Amino acid sequence: MRSIRRGTTLSYGEVALRVGKPGGARAVVAALNHLDDVPWWRVARHDGTLAPLVAREQARLLRAEGWKLRKRS
C-alpha cells in the first residue's frame, strides 16, 4: 500500500496481484483489518467505490492527498 501513489487507489485484487497472490482479494481485506501502519485508504473495491463501513473516513484521507471523487455512471 505504501507504493500506491498518494491520492490514488488500487483494487483489493490489484494489490493481491502485486504481492503475487492472484485471486487473493479477500486476503488483502483481511490483512488490512490487522495492519495499522499502512495507508489502507488507498485500496478500494474493483469498481472504484469505497467500502461502506469506512467510506467517509477513507474519502477524507484520500481527499487530503489530492484525490478527486469519480462520478459513477
Image (spheres, helix red, strand yellow):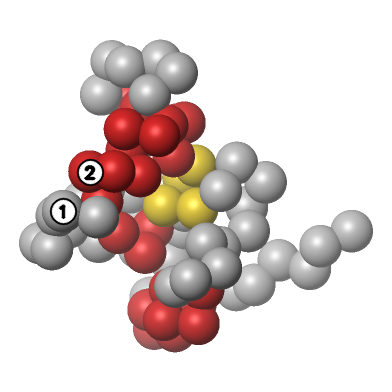
Badge 1: residue crowd in 10 Å (few <14, some 14–19, many ≥20): few
Kind of residue indicated by mark 2: Ala
Q: Is residue 5 above or below residue 24?
A: below
Of 55 and 1, nearer the camera is 55
Q: What residue sits 26% from the left and 51% below the top?
A: 32
The numbered mark at residue 31 is 2
Image position, residue 50 (x, y; %) = 56, 63
Task: Tell me if 68 is positioned left or right of 22 in this view.
Answer: right
Where is residue 38 drawn, in percent x and y? 17, 57
What amino acid type should be assigned to the residue bearing mark 1? His
Confirm whether residue 63 shows in the render. Answer: no
Looking at the image, residue 54 lies above or below residue 39:
below
Front in this rendered view, residue 23 or 69: 23
Instruction: Relative to 55, say whether 38 is above or below.
Output: above
Q: Residue 72: percent from the left, percent from the top?
A: 81, 62
Count of residue discs: 2
Residue identified by numbered label 1: 34
Q: Quadrant of residue 27?
A: top left
Residue located at (40% from left, 34% from top): 26
Q: Secondary structure at mark 2?
A: helix
Can the viewer see residue 38? yes
Left-right relation of 6 to 23: left
Q: Residue furthest left?
A: 37
- Specify whether 37 is left or right of 5: left
Q: Report crowding for label 2: few under 14, some 14 to 19, many 20 or more residues within 10 A (C-alpha).
A: few
Quarter holding residue 25: top left
Q: Are marks 1 and 2 in contact (CB under 8 Å)?
A: yes
Q: Residue at x 60, y 73 (%)?
A: 68
Q: Residue at x 45, y 18 (%)?
A: 23
Above or below: residue 20 compared with residue 27: above
Q: Secondary structure at mark 1?
A: loop
18 to the left or right of 66: left
